[in-house]
Image: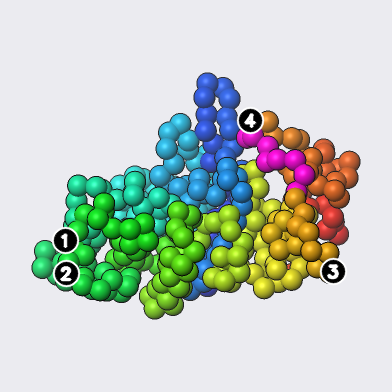
């Protein structure tokens, strides 16, 4: 869990992001720790409202007020992003870290041609001419799968389908050849066929550009297809970190086991899917102790009293659960 590892591109340690009003604070991201290695896709998975998007916005330092980072570290390329000024972060966003937002229609400017929107990022971070930025934008359109790139360059977002708009956002995110791309539910509003094309494109770009990716989703199937390692998030906390193949064969946390059983069914002859009892708690009504204990069939008295610490299980695996006490 330490910082000193040359193979780690991003190292988030004890990050806490809160939304405050008067004397009351809601901890949307509460002491989470994870890291992303160079060249890997890390999947951050959880239900809606668990803090995945706020985690991404915290890394980018784009948390909307009254939210703010109140603790922890975000080490990226030997700098702690949590301590940087807005001016310094502007130099990193779009250049060293790209982001693909969840909703392409609201993320793109409706009155600018898509080519101009790709160029904006290039001009902001690279010392290149107008001609060079246009040439690079057209090449990016080709790389994300467009034919007739000159025509696409001149079109407006409303003239494109949802999948095409998402490709434009991907082109913008990778335009400056960043070290890290954050993809926040990039296939949510897409049909299955388009989703498959976008996922294949992202995987190809990660490999081709040699970059890393934080892929945020509620869909375990996507991470099974794309990712190398996975973090399971619940009520503002990461409950388990695991290697993807190992996670699907032998998940560690009871919540993880419940997620798999509710999607794929349990192993054996029984074919029915099993729902996790109860519902995700509101941030204003979190239980004491382990935040999952009201829904957990393995809960012990200790789970109701204390927050479980991180337990190292093996190489690159850990879990927050008293079932794994030493």
In this view, the mark in front (3 or 2): 3
Along the polypeptide, which appears first: circle 4 or circle 3? 3
- Residue 32 locus on image (x, y percent): 61, 50
- The Cα–Cα distance between marks 4 and 3, rounded to whole angstroms, is 41 Å
- The Cα–Cα distance between marks 1 and 4, rounded to whole angstroms, is 47 Å
Along the polypeptide, which appears first: circle 1 or circle 4? 1
Q: Which residue is mark 2?
A: 150
Quadrant location of the N terminus? bottom right
| Left or right of residue 243, residue 37 in this image | left
Along the polypeptide, which appears first: circle 3 or circle 2? 2
Residue 285 image-quadrant placement? top right
Q: Are marks 4 and 3 in contact (CB under 8 Å)?
A: no
- Residues 55 and 1: in front is 55
Q: Which residue is mark 3?
A: 269
- The Cα–Cα distance between marks 1 and 2, rounded to whole angstroms, is 7 Å
Along the polypeptide, which appears first: circle 1 or circle 3? 1
């Amino acid at each position: 869990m330490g910082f000193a590892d040359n193979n780690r591109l991003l190292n988030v340690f004890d990050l806490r992001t809160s939304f405050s009003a008067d004397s009351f604070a809601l901890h949307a991201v509460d002491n989470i720790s994870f890291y992303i290695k160079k060249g890997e896709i890390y999947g951050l998975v959880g239900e809606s409202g668990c803090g995945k998007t706020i985690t991404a916005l915290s890394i980018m330092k784009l948390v909307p007020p009254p939210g703010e980072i109140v603790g922890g570290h975000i080490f990226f390329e030997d700098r702690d992003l949590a301590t940087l000024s807005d001016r310094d972060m502007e130099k990193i966003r779009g250049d060293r870290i790209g982001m693909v937002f969840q909703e392409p229609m609201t993320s793109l400017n409706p009155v600018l041609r898509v080519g101009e929107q790709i160029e904006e990022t290039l001009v902001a971070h690279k010392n290149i001419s107008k001609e060079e930025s246009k040439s690079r934008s057209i090449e990016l359109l080709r790389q994300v799968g467009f034919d007739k790139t000159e025509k696409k360059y001149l079109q407006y977002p409303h003239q494109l389908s949802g999948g095409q708009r998402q490709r434009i956002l991907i082109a913008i995110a990778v335009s400056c050849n960043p070290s890290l791309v954050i993809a926040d539910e990039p296939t949510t509003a897409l049909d299955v066929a388009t989703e498959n094309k976008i996922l294949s494109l992202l995987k190809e770009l990660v490999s081709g550009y040699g970059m890393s990716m934080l892929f945020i989703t509620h869909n375990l199937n996507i991470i099974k297809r794309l990712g190398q390692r996975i973090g399971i998030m619940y009520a503002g906390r990461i409950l388990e970190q695991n290697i993807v193949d190992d996670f699907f064969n032998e998940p560690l946390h009871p919540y993880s086991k419940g997620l798999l059983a509710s999607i794929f069914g349990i192993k054996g002859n029984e074919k029915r899917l099993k729902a996790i009892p109860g519902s995700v708690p509101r941030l204003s009504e979190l239980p004491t102790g382990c935040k999952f204990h009201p829904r957990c069939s393995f809960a012990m008295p200790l789970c109701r009293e204390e927050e479980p610490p991180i337990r190292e299980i093996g190489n690159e695996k850990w879990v927050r659960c008293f079932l794994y006490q030493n």
